[in-house]
Image (spheres, rainbow, N blue to C red):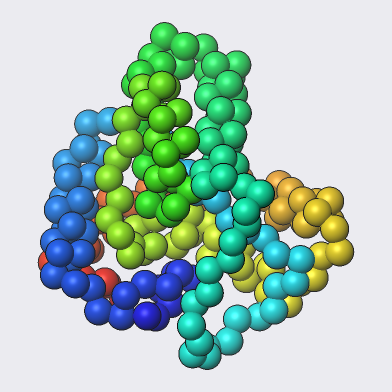
Amino acid sequence: MIQKQGHWVSYELKPRDVERRFGTCELLLQRQKRKDFLTGDEKWIHYNNPKRRKSWGKPRKTKYPWLEAGDRYRLQLMRLSRAFKEKRPLYAQRHDKVILLHDNARPHIAKPVKTYLETLKWEVLPHPLYSPDIAPFDFHLFRSMAHGLADRRFHSYEEAQKWIDSWIAPKDMSFFRRGIHVLPERWSKVVESDGKYFH
C-alpha cells in the first residue's frame, strides 16, 4: 500500500482495477460531453493535525459503533436535496435528473445511502476503486485544505467548524469549479495511461 492523494491505495493496481479505471474514465469522458453532474465527498477534520511525514505503517481502521454505516452521508444528501428544492426551483421539476459522482468510500456505498439515492431517483456515476486521482474533492479541495490544516490543533468542535468556515469563505467559485473542470483532463490521462496511475 502507498499513499496517493492522501489515501492508501494498492501499490500496484491489479489488472481488473486498471481495466475498470480505463473503462470508467472512457465512459465518463463520453458522458461529460452530454450532461452536467454533481460531485460530493466528506472529510474528517481531527482536533490534532500533525504535519504529514512519510513513514511506513499499517493503515488502521477506526470503528465508530454509534454511527451506522453511511448515516451521516445520507443525512447530508437529505439536506442537499432539500437545499436543491429551496434554491433551485427547476430541481423540483427535474428531480430524477440529478447525476451524482462520488467515490466508493464505505459511507457512499452503504445500504441506507443506496436506498435513499434510489428513492431520490438520482443516477450515480461509476467510480473505480483506488482512484483518488480522479475524485475532485481528493485531488483538489482536500489536498488544498490539508496544507492549511498542517500542525493545526483544535480544542472543540466549534473551533474546528469556525476554521473550516473561515478557510472556505475567501474562496471564490472559480476555486471550486477548477477541481470539476479538470476532471475530463484527468479522465483523459487515465485513458492515455491505459488505466494506470499518472503523475
| Residue most extreme to the front | 65
Can residue 192 be seen here? no
Asked whether, in this view, residue 56 is left or right of residue 103, the answer is right
Is 119 on the left or on the right of 128, as rendered?
right
x, y percent for residue 147: 62, 71
Residue 179 image offset from top left, x and y in percent: 44, 52
Q: Quadrant of residue 167?
A: bottom right
Residue shown at 57% from the left, 45% from the top = 68
Q: Compared with residue 38, is residue 119 higher up or lower down, i.e. above or below? A: above
Above or below: residue 5 compared with residue 167: below
Q: Quadrant of the C terminus?
A: bottom left
* Badge count: 0
Query: Which residue: 39% across, 62% down?
Result: 132
- The image shows residue 45 at horizontal and vertical percentages of 67, 60
Residue at 17% across / 45% down in the picture? 27
Which residue is at 59% across, 34% downward? 75
Across and down, in percent, residue 99 comes to: 35, 31
Answer left or right for 62 relative to 31: right
Residue farthest to the top, as pictured: 93
Quadrant of the rendering where the N terminus is positioned: bottom left
> In the visual, does 29 lie left or right of 38?
left
Residue placed farthest to the bottom in the image?
Answer: 55
Quadrant of res 80: top right
Against 106, residue 84 (above or below) is above
* The quarter of the displayed image where residue 122 is located: top left
- Is the residue 4 above or below the residue 33 in the image? below
> In this orientation, which residue lies closer to the viewer: 168 or 174?
168
Judge whether residue 168 can be spotted in this image: yes
